[in-house]
Image: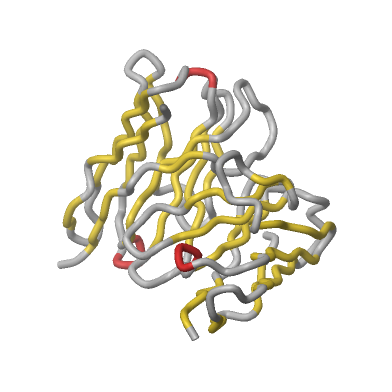
Amino acid sequence: QVQLVESGGGVVQPGGSLRLSCAASGFTFSSYGMHWVRQAPGKGLEWVAFIRYDENNKYYADSVKGRFTISRDNSKNTLYLQMNSLRAEDTAVYYCAKVRTPSGTYPEYFQHWGQGTLVTVSS
Amino acid sequence: DIQMTQSPSTLSASVGDRVTITCRASQSISRWLAWYQQKPGKAPKLLIYKASSLESGVPSRFSGSGSGTEFTLTISSLQPDDFATYYCQQYNIYGFTFGPGTKVDIK
């Protein structure tokens, strides 16, 4: 079955960097677009970034554009989120999520989610 | 960006009640709307996609309707496992946005 396991979270100082990983299994990773979604403590869900299955398109929320970079290594079945210039408001649980349709070229919802990894930005 | 609103923000109900949550989009999103359920400390779970399509494995007491800018999620007979927070989400365009959530708690 589909399994998504995030890692790389932790405590980082404002202005610092962190790279999150999402290890995928149970499906053909290279065929599916992937998202990062975050949730600040006690708050709602916020979409962060999307990467198409073939890496040809990437999209970002305005709140992270220019600071975060989404990437993937299809040979390692792994999704990444490089986070630079971190701010206190980036503190959240970060989830990776998979779309439903293989080789999709249009926006789609989040069918499967990982369990999340907590990022805390604090001095 | 498309803004999503939900009402009510909190809903107190009893087991067996029929529950309806409303989601509104700031512009037409056709039927590109999904609903998720989230329990404390857990990842969200997909319930409904394309406004009214039930995700595999989701109980049939959950249903969705609507198009354009107004949508509803209905739970026909609330069960103990359904006490949770529910979010709508548009996927009409990249720049996906979620509603603020509706918490369903025990009356």
Q: Is residue B94 above or below residue A90?
A: above
Judge left or right: residue B87 versus residue B63. Answer: left
The N terminus of chain A appears in which quarter of the rendering?
A: top left
As drawn, B79 above or below A6: below
Is residue A77 positioned above or below B91 on the image? above
Residue A8 percent across, percent down from the top left: 22, 42
* Residue at left offset 49%, top offset 86%: B107
Side (left or right) of A115 relative to B4: left
Image location of residue B49, percent across then percent down? 67, 47
Residue at x-position 30% and y-position 62%: A91
Res B101 → quadrant: bottom right
Between residues A6 and B44, which one lies in front from this camera angle?
B44
Give whichever of B23, B19 is nearer the camera: B19
Query: Taking B90 as reference, is A12 left or right?
Result: left
Residue B2 image offset from top left, x and y in percent: 70, 61
Q: Quadrant of the C terminus of chain A?
A: bottom left
Residue that sits furthest to the front in the current view: B16
Q: Quadrant of residue A108?
A: top right
